[in-house]
Amino acid sequence: MSRFPFQKRAKFARKRTKAKIRIKRKDPLLVDGKRPKPLYVDYKDVDLLKKLTSRQGKIISRRKNGCCATSQHAVAEAIKRSRFMALLPYVGD
């Protein structure tokens, strides 16, 4: 008899799903495998910043681009500066 009388016993035991192996993505701002100190992303480097924005001109999230928190803050600041200086568009295509 179960501890709780209102619970019914499952007829079939659920199979456990295998844990998915997470692949650690490389931070796109690392230089030779190390993070430069102080971390500074050049707002004039338009090619790098275009890789970190979507077609609509939005900043890509950390989960998608693989940046850590500190480098994502630096990227966001650089993108905003380059938008203000008219190097990047506020709105994409």
Image (spheres, rainbow, N blue to C red):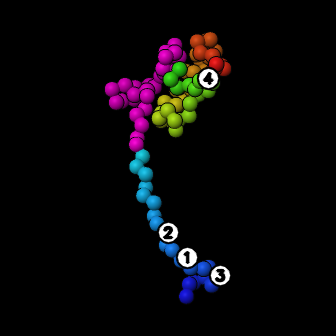
Whether residue 70 appears in this view of the structure is no
Verify CB contact (< 8 Å) between mark 2 and mark 3.
no
In primary-sequence order, the first of circles 3 and 4 is 3
Verify CB contact (< 8 Å) between mark 1 and mark 2.
yes
Crowd class of label 4 (few under 14; some 14 to 19; many from 20; radius 10 Å): some
Label 1 is placed on what type of residue?
Ala
Q: Disc 3 and disc 4: Cα gap in Å?
A: 55 Å
Q: Disc 3 and disc 1: Cα gap in Å?
A: 13 Å
Q: Disc 2 and disc 4: Cα gap in Å?
A: 45 Å
In primary-sequence order, the first of circles 4 and 1 is 1
Give the mark toward the camera: 2 or 3: 2
What is the quadrant of the N terminus in the image?
bottom right
Check residue 37 in the rendering and tell me which mark sits there, or answer none. Answer: none
Label 2 is placed on what type of residue?
Arg
Q: Which residue position is annotated with label 2? A: 14
- Residue positioned 58% across, 12% down in the render: 87
Give the mark toward the camera: 4 or 1: 1
